[in-house]
Amino acid sequence: LEADNTTEYAAYERGGIVTQVKEPKVLKFNPLRKAISDPGDFLLSDFSKFDRPPILHLTFQALDKFVSLSGRFPVAGSEEDAQRLISLVTDMNNSQDAKVEIDHKLIRNFAFGARAVLNPMAAMFGGIIGLQ
């Protein structure tokens, strides 16, 4: 039976109820430990910046290392902290097999805003971490 074939229905008079049924979809994700070292395919959210996800993935790892080493996030506007983060990203990039192109301006801006707390993002990450 074709879904668009309405020839056997009575003439439309008025009203009517339609119910949309959403089929469940099972998604499988790698554990965080594996996903950090081998993220696989990145979900693109900005189709004008295809090259961003791999460098951002590496930069978030470098930020974690920065916090572990210094006990704090980079200070907003601190050129010294930005250069330390760029150095960490470069070192991490050189130690892995698949190299990514380093964008110094992107990492610098990332360092300047790393201390910021965006409440919707914090809530989303909190929910993800809470599931672990």
Image: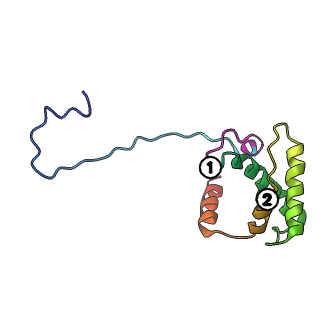
Q: Classify mark 2: helix, strand or loop.
A: helix
Q: Position of residue 11 (x, y in %)?
A: 9, 41
Number of numbered discs present? 2
Task: Inspect this view and state whether residue 68 appears.
Answer: no
The amino acid type found where label 1 is placed reads Ser
The amino acid type found where label 2 is placed reads Lys
Image: magenta residue range: 34-48
On screen, residue 78 above or below 69: below
- Would you call the spot at circle 1 few (<14 residues within 10 Å), some (14-19), or many (20 or more)? few
Residue that badge 1 annotates: 48
Q: Residue furthest top?
A: 1
Q: Is 64 positioned to the left or the right of 21 in the image? A: right
Q: Residue at x 80, y 62 (%)?
A: 108
Q: Is 73 positioned to the left or the right of 128 in the image? A: right
Task: Write down the quadrant of residue 99 in the picture.
Answer: top right
Q: Are marks 2 and 1 in contact (CB under 8 Å)?
A: no
What's the mark number on residue 113? none
Q: Position of residue 28 (x, y in %)?
A: 59, 39
Q: Locate the N terminus by quadrant.
A: top left
Q: Classify mark 1: helix, strand or loop.
A: loop
* Colour theme: rainbow
For the residue pair 112 and 20, the one nearer the viewer reads as 112
Task: Write down the quadrant of residue 5 in the picture.
Answer: top left
Task: Write down the quadrant of residue 107 in the picture.
Answer: bottom right
Q: Position of residue 44 (x, y in %)?
A: 61, 46
Q: Residue at x 73, y 46 (%)?
A: 54
Residue that badge 2 annotates: 105
Which of the marked residues, 2 or 1, is nearer the chain's N terminus?
1
